[in-house]
Amino acid sequence: LNVGFLINQAIGYSRDFPFDIAQIHIPPDLDLLSLTGTARFTRTPQGLLAQIKMQAHVESECVRCLNHTVSPLVVDFSELYAFSKKTASETGLLLPENGYILLEPLLREYMLLELPINPLCRPNCQGLCPVCGADLNEHACEHNEQPIDDRLAVLKSLKRESKE
Ligand SMILES: [Zn+2]
Ligand SMILES: [Zn+2]
């Protein structure tokens, strides 16, 4: 992003940069789909204030059934690209002298914070049968009684604990 021209604008001047990217790889490890949103840069006395509102999708594997799943990510943050170290915020971001900002590393950091730790293909995913590996979302298998028994056993032990 070339934001250098904003330096010569009046304080309070801002410019929106819309994003609409079907697929993007952010080195070293982040692949995003349908990245959309806006980066707004505003000239302030201290530097250029970036206000980023973006959403994207990330591909992952459901932790229960291992099926391919796509999770939404939403980020909304502000960072100051300061003119000098004196006015820098605690993140210490400085506006490069050539006025070109590489937004990807910052975006990556915030997107990684939003990554689901335990992605699920659906909230009530039944997972795989621990015995035969059948996808229990698609069809029940003969071992399917087992998990229900387990759940009952847990309930019973909970009841026992609450009595004690
Ligand atoms: Zn699943
Ligand atoms: Zn089974």
Image: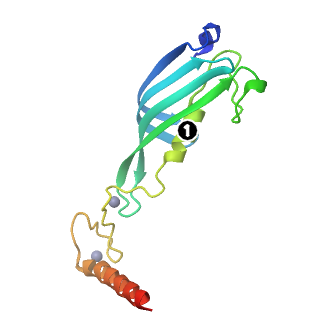
Q: Residue at x 33, y 68 (%)?
A: 128
**Which class describes the residues within 10 Å of circle 1: few (<14), some (14-19), or many (20+)?**
some
Can see residue 1?
no
Q: Which residue was labeled with disc 1? A: 108
- Viewer-side residue, 58 vs 51: 51
Q: Is residue 74 above or below residue 85?
A: below
Q: Quadrant of residue 8?
A: top right
User: Dot 1: what SS?
Assistant: helix
Q: Quadrant of residue 126?
A: bottom left
Ligand 2 rendered quadrant = bottom left
Considering the image in quadrants, where does the N terminus appear? top right
Left or right of 41: which side holds 147?
A: left
Q: Is residue 4 above or below residue 60?
A: above
Residue at the farthest right position: 86
The spot of residue 44 in percent (x, y) is 63, 18
The spot of residue 12 in percent (x, y) is 57, 14
Q: Amino acid at mark 1?
A: Arg
Residue at the farthest front position: 163
Q: Quadrant of residue 61?
A: bottom left
Left or right of 155: which side holds 106?
A: right
The spot of residue 45 in percent (x, y) is 67, 17
